[in-house]
Amino acid sequence: MGLIKDLLDVIYPSTCPGCGKVMEPGGLWCKECIKNVWDPRLINSSFTEHLSGCYTLCRYEGTLRDCIISLKYGGKKEKVRAFPPLLDRFPFWDRIGTFDMVIPVPLSKAKMTKRGYNQVDLMFEIWMKGHYKNYVRNGLVRIRSGETQSLLSRVERFENIKGLFHIRKDLSLAGKTILLVEQRCLGLIQFKERYA
């Protein structure tokens, strides 16, 4: 198996998902691209009555933004390989603490039908399951289509999502701590209090 992998590395070398530079075997992001996007932090304004914070891994710009857009709109599923190394190096898993399940932000039915996949699932599911996290696809159900968030102001975004989702009827969240994941900036959003 080692010989085959070595041969494949020579024929199909790993390239940086940002700039396309050929990387050493096992490498992924080049130092320049990771330096330009890597910015893990807790967003100060993310503490609310129901949330204990929203963490972001990267700035949504440059090569990372290009990877997400290629995956999301261009059907470039191979770009999914860009995200596990970022989750691996995220420094604040201990701050997030324990959680009972991971739920992705869902797409509208129309976008899911057109695209055929939810890019958030591709970005997070395999990594979370590989780290023994309970990843619940379709834990949230989108009730209606909203406006495209990226085209709205911050205040308009909050208004746009009101009443947009509900919890799947057969999913019990009683006493659970939830980690909600979304694609923009690779967000990790944790609910403050357990559901009663």
Image: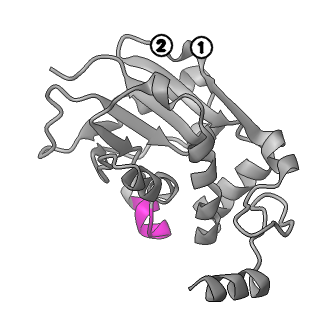
As drawn, 102 above or below 126: above
As drawn, 23 above or below 175: below
> On the image, numbered disc 1 is attached to which residue?
44
Q: Nearer the viewer, residue 146 or 3?
A: 3
Residue 21, horizontal then vertical, whole percent? 86, 66
Left or right relative to 93: residue 20:
right
Residue 77, horizontal then vertical, whole percent? 58, 69
Left or right relative to 83: residue 11:
right
Which quadrant, please, contains the N terminus? Answer: bottom right
Q: Residue at x 37, y 54 (%)?
A: 129
Magenta-drawn stretch contains 180: no
As drawn, 71 above or below 63: below
> On the image, numbered disc 2 is attached to which residue?
47
Span of residues in magenta: 110-117
Which quarter of the picture shows residue 17? bottom right
Magenta-drawn stretch contains 115: yes
Q: Nearer the viewer, residue 109 or 45?
A: 45
As drawn, 163 above or below 65: above
